[in-house]
Image (cartoon, helix red, strand yellow):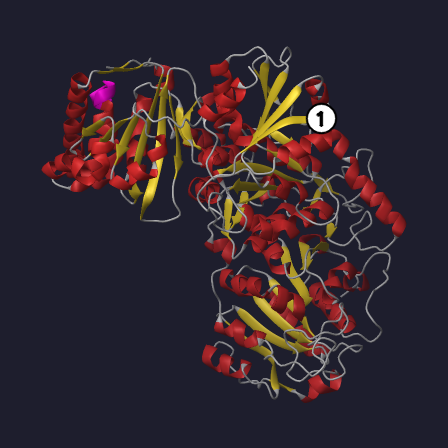
Amino acid sequence: MRHFYNDLSIVLGGAAGQGVQTVENILMAVLKREGYQVFACKEYMSRVRGGSNSTEIRLSSKKHRSYVRRIDFLFAMDGNVVEHLSDRISDRTIVFGEQSRIKEYATLAHFIDTPLTKFASEVGNPLYANTVAVGVILGILGAEEKIFHEYLSEFFSRKGQEVVEKNIEAAKKGFQFGKNTAYQEDIELGFPRDDKYAKELLIDGHTALGLGALSGGCNFISSYPMSPGTGVLTFLANKGKRLGVVVDQAEDEISAINMALGASYAGARAMVSTSGGGFDLMQEGVSLAGIIETPIVIHIGMRPGPATGLPTKTEQADLNLALYAGHGEFLRAIYTPGSLEEEVALMRQVFDTADQFQIPVFVLTDQYLLDSLAGMKEESIGVASSKRHIVETTADYARYAYTKDGISPRGIPGFGRGIVKVDSDEHDETGHITESYSVREKMMAKRMKRLAAMTDSAIMPTEIDNVKDADILFVAWGSNKGVLEESLALVRSKKIGGLHFSQAYPINPKVKEVFKGKKIVVMENNHQGQFADLLVRECGVKIVKRITKSTGEPFCVEEIVDELKKYA
Amino acid sequence: MPETEKKKFDMPHGTDIAWCPACGNFPLLNVVKQSLSELEIDPSNLVLVSGIGQAAKTPQYVHANMYNGLHGRALPSAVGIKLAHRDLVVVAESGDGDMYGEGGNHLTHTIRRNPDITAIVHNNMIYGLTKGQASPTSEQGMQNPLQPDGVVVEPFNPMAVAVALDASFVARANIGDILQTKAILKEALAWKGFALVDVFQPCVVFNKVNTYGWFKEHTYYLPDDYDPTDRQAAFAKACETEKMPIGILYKHERSVYEDALGIMGEHPLYRHTLDTEKFAALVKSFV
């Protein structure tokens, strides 16, 4: 007998083009509508067809936003899946698949021959196998069949009544099989269902960024496609146009950032989105933004490098890239959202930060976070105040006027009677080129002066569990928030607390007090421990251990639990 | 025209111009300012965009909005400005190295987009700012510090490339003829669509070959009956290299990028605010 009460990990695996994505989409949408709490993340190969891709769907009674290595149910579309995921399949994994397609079935501790294509063919087309698979899972769960059918009707309505009916037929066959299997195999599942989850939004990391950008007043994006940075560009191209967003697919990343800066100079709230390799090309633009004091938001969806690296996998190795990009000295801010909710909230804020301080602002995410999918409360998405930090110019306007805090009122061309000159050369208050040492000194001081206000307003890290009384602090940034939260909750040691940084730079000086007297362990998805280095530099702390991982996979709960136990 | 109008693009307090005495950039600067004045363009509604180089310093000496960006990037910056605020008059002005070398890819794709922007390219067939190296338009055989035995690669032919890409407006001028240059520039500035004007202009310090005299000898005026809407004829003219034609080579009215994009909502973008009702409906679509 197998009981699953609080936490179930379902993994769907198949070749690219086999429909794993469709199964995930339908299953996640139906599970959410049924009132379950769900989270999904995926890993895939850099190919359009073939290979072996998988999606993990977690059903839980508590809110979990992390990847577990453990697989409870594996739905394998073919034998490659079993091979690809062999180190995650244990004696406790129940594998569902068609015996004829999975030659390794005899080696599996618990295999259930599941007639996915057989049922589909009976309905009329092997393509319905995906719907059969969803049916099997929902049947095992004992879900409400009516909600499933309603969803299928909506999902396939564009394809006509026949397709809808065939899908429902396939769904029924799968569902009945799932129900029977649960009974025969004595599988029992008990998960609380709540209407409040049914009312949540179901969004992925790309959508979260896009909604956040829109709510922050973003109205311009120019970019060149590169995974995993393309998603937000696609989102804004499809959903943003009706809201007045101007979208340009640039000829290269160099053009993209220079175009966005031109737009920003002329008054747009502009962003670019790319990955590390594309951002390499954008670096000149970051330096330009620094000297012309023109706001820009730069999203880097990180993936493993160097060069082409592992194009579809995940890593957090571009923190140093963002931190040091561009020649010369100038200011920047780097945000590192740890969840879908933080993506929305930070994207809403960063356009304001960029405008307020007239600086380049980075948002660092990664493939894992961007491709994760979960329910989110609608209230998480608000609309930012529309303060634009722009002045109407007068005839005597000077773009780089010296001020007490270093922030010169920002005029834009065509708004007011003044002339707005911005210059990549060192310049005087009017923006006119200069080679005067004394003007250079004053301008550098003016530009750097803004750091004080930026640092004081930097976001404090989120404290997880009891940080105050802990001896040891586990520190994470970016996408590792969920895995740290869940692992700490599992280990439950009063000796260990967690800190998550959603802003990596600048670091609020008050952080030093939080660190005082604690042993610090930093976990991050890269080889060297780039954030650990930054903490040493900025806070003067000693790091007792760096937990790093640069395989291209995210951390799983199990490995962080193991690390925590060493200190518990 | 009153004197004040003529001088409205002059820098209010005068300025120290960083060009060499007798540089071909001086007459071109004057012609640009005159053309803008005669077209009654308002300095506060004009943005001069440039990259890097001696030619790219031109906006420094004009009383108008200025975006002096990076080497090769005048055009992407100009496109961004136009898309954010389409009522602005946007002129990109840079040299042959900037527009045809470092920014060659951007030229290609800006022609494809066809924004309502004028690009003025100072073509002196040499690098001035970096002291005398070959430019993309330098002729074969030209000796210079980096090719002491002479340039071996073919020169870039901007006119032929532009016509091949079906650019909206393609013209070449010679600053040796100020009146004709002004006439061409005024037509380019008034043109709706992307207008490329390549202007021959000598570098008196580093280029001892392509002088005022050389440009006069190696050019001729397109005849009065020349039809600039005939693309095949324009391409044939653009490919002439012994004696090069001066004038408007090609014109093709095409829809401009900012229209074709179908920009919706409040424009210019600095006045844009989020339509909260539409946004709420979008959010709801994810339930």
Going by the image, does A210 lie left or right of A182?
right
**Residue A208 coordinates in the image, percent (x, y):** 47, 32
Q: Which residues are magenta?
A: A139-147
Residue sitting at x 64%, y 10%? A469
Which quarter of the rendered picture does the N terminus of chain A lie within? top left
Q: Is residue B89 above or below residue A261?
A: below
User: Is residue A140 shown in magenta?
Assistant: yes
User: Is residue A144 shown in magenta?
Assistant: yes
| Chain of the residue that carries numbered disc 1 in the rendered image | A
Toward the front, the furthest residue is A107
**Residue B33 coordinates in the image, percent (x, y):** 74, 65
Going by the image, does A194 lie left or right of A377?
left
**Residue B260 coordinates in the image, percent (x, y):** 46, 55
Judge whether residue A416 can be spotted in this image: no
Determine which quarter of the picture holds residue B224: bottom right
Q: Is residue A401 above or below residue B190?
A: above
Q: Is residue A270 above or below residue B59?
A: above
Going by the image, does B278 lie left or right of B243?
left
Residue flagged by tag 1: what amino acid is it?
Val
Which quarter of the rendered picture does the C terminus of chain A lie within? top right
Going by the image, does A69 lie left or right of B234?
left
- Foreground pick, A66 / B189: A66
Residue sitting at x 25%, y 19%? A141
**Residue A533 coordinates in the image, percent (x, y):** 67, 34
Toward the right, the furthest residue is A438
SS at mark 1 in the image: loop
Name the residue carrying label 1.
Answer: A541
Residue sitting at x 19%, y 24%? A178
